[in-house]
Image (cartoon, grey):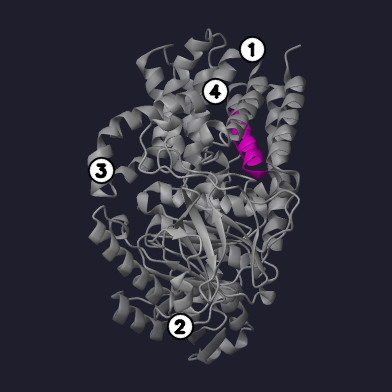
Amino acid sequence: MKVCVNLNDSRWKKYKIDFEKIACTAVGAVYKDSEVSIVLTDDDEIHQLNLQYRGMDKPTNVLSFELGDDVLLGDIYISLDTVVREAREAKISVEEHAAHMVVHGMLHLIGYDHITDDEATVMEFKEINILKKLGIKNPYEENLEITCADGSCCVGSKTIAWLKRLKVKENSWVQYALYALFGGVASFGFAPFYQWWWTLIGIAGAYWLTVRNENIGGFWKSLLRVSPFGAMYAISMFWWVLNSIYVIPELAAKFAIWTAPAIIGLGIAGVFIFSWPLVAIARVAGNRAYRAILFAATWTLVLWLREWMFTGFPWNPVANIWAMVPWLYNSMSLWGALGLTFITVGFVAGIVNLVRAPKSKRNWFVFWLFIVLAVTGCVVGKRNIAVSNTGAQDSSYLIRIVQPAQSQAQKSSHDRAGAIANAEYNVRNLIMLAAQDGDPDLIVFPETAYPLVVIDGDDMPLSVALGTNVIVGATTYRDGRLFNSMVLSDYNGQINKIYSKSHLVPFGEYRPMGILPSPANLSAGNGPELIEVDGFVFAPAVCYEVIFSDSLLPRGGDRPDAIVNITNDNWFGATPGTYQHLDMVRRYAIESGLPIVRSNYSGISAFVFPDGNIISSLPIGESGILDGYVWGAHDTPYRMIGMNWWMAIILLTAILGLRICRDK
């Protein structure tokens, strides 16, 4: 990237700062052909600019003026007077603080902001990671530091102390209401909220309600007691699936009547899925340390079973709440979401046990067990981040992602003439979007982007019009069956490969048990495989296939360069489900050690790297393209060992811990 540094204040000369290196590190190789101007000035000039363009009658540290262009990114103004003053107050060097201002300004130029709390959290997270690469410590560390020795200022401690004093009558409405409250609260740790402490509080509260009495009763009594937690946890996390009913008026007219039964069904499913860890600790005798390990192991076992039960739906493992804590988040490269979930749930239960019985040696053993596991994971996670960011200089295969961002109604029509007109318009629109400046080696369109059914012998007009290799989602037909497929064609329009989705969505793509309602009845493909195009080897994934851990790569095969995931989250709009789907992609990238190219019909399309970092993305509802390269593919311990063996290791660890903590 070309960095033009303009010296409007000669005092800057005394500071040895490599502005070009800082700016390039901030935006990565995606912007290697871009240009940016950095103006080094003083308080007087930046004061005038701040007043003129922002209406603020005071100087500031940095101002960014973005041009909205991928080549000419814009201008960054940095005031020496303010930077020196702030550096002195923070007790850091001027060079470090100036580097932070450059990173902050560059992120603004490529679309990041901090207007809302969520935006600020994401931007600060990016800044911390970039500065770490430059050898500069976390500039926000002082604000996060906890200094109290008794834990009274720790996140959630006041709530736990309140719970410790609270007297809740057994089988009272207050008890059931608290279980439901904790189930709802626990959902706020996931995207787009990322309030991880609420998930910890929710799990801790439900655990406390369950272990406060030693003798609860039989199985059904225990299940009834804890059922509000499982029901509300499921409804709070998955209500967004019902948004799909209302996306197309014709579907809403037919299926809206199922809304209330579906919500009730979500609650009932939650009872029989998410209540098991609480039932286990309610039913099995043992001291509190014993129960903490059992609770964590059962929760993790349920997550593993969710990969398979009723076609599987392992959405939102507890591990995903750590998306804003990079080292811990990347511990999934060692033991996957299973291991990080085990550690998180066990740690929470261990804390509650210590609050209840701080002098118990067994409770302290459990606490330190999960601390040691967490630290071990962070060490491996840190290495995974480093390995994931190597190889950028070798990247030369340019990939373009296309996000049409049309509504679902624009894509289809139940009127034949309307459907044909929509199809013709959509093809023209896809070509216009994809034909922007640049010379991509591969263009990736999202799931079901091609509006016509593809049969054997067809050519692909998209690749002919664009003159390059194209991946596009389409419905394909063969042997009397319809498939949801990824179609690969070359610049001549010849279709070289069709990969069909093997893990279909119940109720959306087929009728469960052949009788329950569904708008489609598709057939499943043959499972994971690798596809090669011009030396670029990738594993295909259609839609939510990418949420299934350890599922996309053929066993014993070569390591691909990336995963290409095409999807269509039009059905869920701007609900939490769309953001959570992207986090499931990030989880898979970390576990597999592979970058993921994700093309979504209406958002969020992204380049996701093997450390779960989102290099670039297009937001929900925004039409456009993303050009980028992929690198950093590597083998992770998790992928080499595999999900099932890791589940066995976790269970063996739990059994060993249970034996150590069992009653004498």
Identity of the amino acid at label 4? Trp
- What residue is disc 3 on? 252
Decide if residue 376 is on the left or right side of residue 175: right
Q: Secondary structure at mark 4?
A: helix
Whether residue 638 is situated above or below residue 55 in the rendered picture = above
Identity of the amino acid at label 2? Asp
Whether residue 460 is situated above or below residue 604 in the rendered picture = below
Magenta-colored stretch includes residue 348: yes
Q: Position of residue 638 (x, y in %)?
A: 71, 47
What range of the chain is rendered magenta? 336-349
Disc on the earlier residue, 4 or 3: 3
- What residue is disc 2 on? 437
Q: In this orientation, which residue lies closer to the viewer: 436 or 618? A: 436
Marks 4, 1: nearer the viewer? 4
Marks 2, 3: nearer the viewer? 3
> Is the residue marked by circle 3 packed among few (<14), some (14-19), or many (20+) residues within 10 Å?
some
Q: In this orientation, which residue lies closer to the viewer: 109 or 568? A: 568
Q: CA distance from mark 2 to mark 4?
A: 55 Å
Disc on the earlier residue, 2 or 3: 3
Magenta-colored stretch includes residue 255: no
Disc on the earlier residue, 1 or 2: 1
- What residue is disc 4 on? 276
Quadrant of the image occupied by residue 602: bottom left
